[in-house]
Image (spheres, helix red, strand yellow):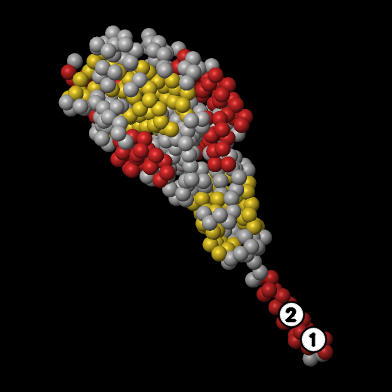
Amino acid sequence: MPDKKQDLIDQTLQDLNNDGVDRRGFLKCMAWAGTGLVWTMSGGIPVSRAFAKGYGKDAGKGADFTFVQISDSHIGFNKPANPDVAATLQTAINKINAMPQKPDFIIHTGDLSQLSKPSEFDTLDQVLKGASAKQIFFVPGEHDMLSDNGEQYLQRYGKGTMGTGWSSFDHKGVHFVGLVNVANLKAGGMGSLGNEQLEWLENDLKGRSASTPIVLFAHIPLWTIYPDWGWGTDDSEQALSYVKRFGSVTVLNGHIHQIMQKVEGKVSFHTAMSTAFPQPAPGTAPSAGPMKVPADQLQRVLGITDVNYVVSGRSLAVVDSPLGDAGASASGTASTHLSVVDPIHG
Amino acid sequence: MTKKNMWVAGVATPVMIAMLLLFAVSPSVKASDQPSAANAAVKIDNFVFGPQTITVPVGTTVTWTNADDIPHTSVSTEGVFKSKVMDTDEKFSYTFTKAGTYPYYCTIHPKMTGKVVVQ
């Protein structure tokens, strides 16, 4: 089906930083997405491979893995856009627990709470306790910094982190870096990493082989989506310059409560849906605040992100799924988006 | 003219006219950015401080009220005042005792900026 392949290539390769992927185009290929199709770039030519256990010589060695990104749970929020954010977070956890391919861990990209209150963090912990994936990594959002510059957040979720809560770890050959861009924000500015963290990042990446896949995660997008609403990070260019030499870089963010993607060379940027409430697309509303949708549609605009790392192709496939499916596929996940990350070059 | 008439013409009338003029030019009810000497209000809504620049006399207490469905703060860039987090309908007040210009912003959403000018 060369024509369908070409359409999919065009859609994934173009700059997707408007309001996301054309759903009609992907619905046509829903069958492919349901089987877990992974697109990789090989010598600049996109090549599709069915992604299933048993693929490639490394299959079954346990090196392939999956992790899930959730974001913006905003526990404590109780306005009309979603009067019960703990319930929708529970739905997200149930969905993760039901995945046929168990995630090795979960990453929460911030705004755990609405007001940094201990009771809100307590409720969050209660819900997350029910996740079968026992390891959860966090980075704070600006809503988690509201009590004494994030003291509550750090006490609970900052073990093993430095400064305002940054850290890095390795998992099955992939290097993960959690960054904090919501501390010490300057008037009139957007997100900010700060010099201390940037210096740490530069050192952290030094000496690593360029074939190491890198995953950066932070709350506010590390690329400029919409400055008027603060959707960007003032000093992200410097951070991105440190990862430029790597063959595969995936950037996972939250904050904007909608999916946006962009591929720039070997760097793939992705923002996740919230598990609490959606926000409007850039410039389509007077402000970036919570967007109310009809109650029966709420589950479709909230979601989680599943990231599959395939060792043999050394690529990461990022698949978003809403909490509520408009007709669930057999696998239980209705994928609404698929993105490509380049395999390692040399 | 009789003494009484002279009094009316020479004293009472000018006094009455003067008093009428005095009341006519006295300050009217406060408009949104022309507050009385004691209090002024800034309304936070849709990620905006309204009015963005407010000019008040020395000694005025400015009260910020958050009408947004998202929490905000009001923090001076020079360290002069710092609100706690204001959830919907919560307020913060500060009394400006010195003349000057006081830029401030929301520390949660730093693109939100405002200014209090105290004269």
Q: Amino acid at mark 1?
A: Trp
Q: Quadrant of the N terminus of chain A?
A: top left
| Residue under the point 48% across and 30% down | A160
Mark 1 highlights which residue? B7
| Residue under the point 42% across and 17% down | A104
Mark 2 highlights which residue? B15
Query: Of the residues tagged 2 and 1, which is closer to the observer?
Result: 2
First in residue order: circle 2 vs circle 1: 1
Is residue B71 in view?
no
In this image, B83 relative to A225: left or right? Answer: right
| Residue under the point 47% across and 14% down | A97
Relative to residue A316, is residue A289 depicted above or below? below
Mark 2 belongs to which subunit? B
Q: Nearer the viewer, residue A58 or A160?
A: A160
Q: Quadrant of the C terminus of chain A?
A: top left
Where residue A150 sits, quadrant-wise, is top right
Gap between marks 2 and 1 measured at Cα: 11 Å
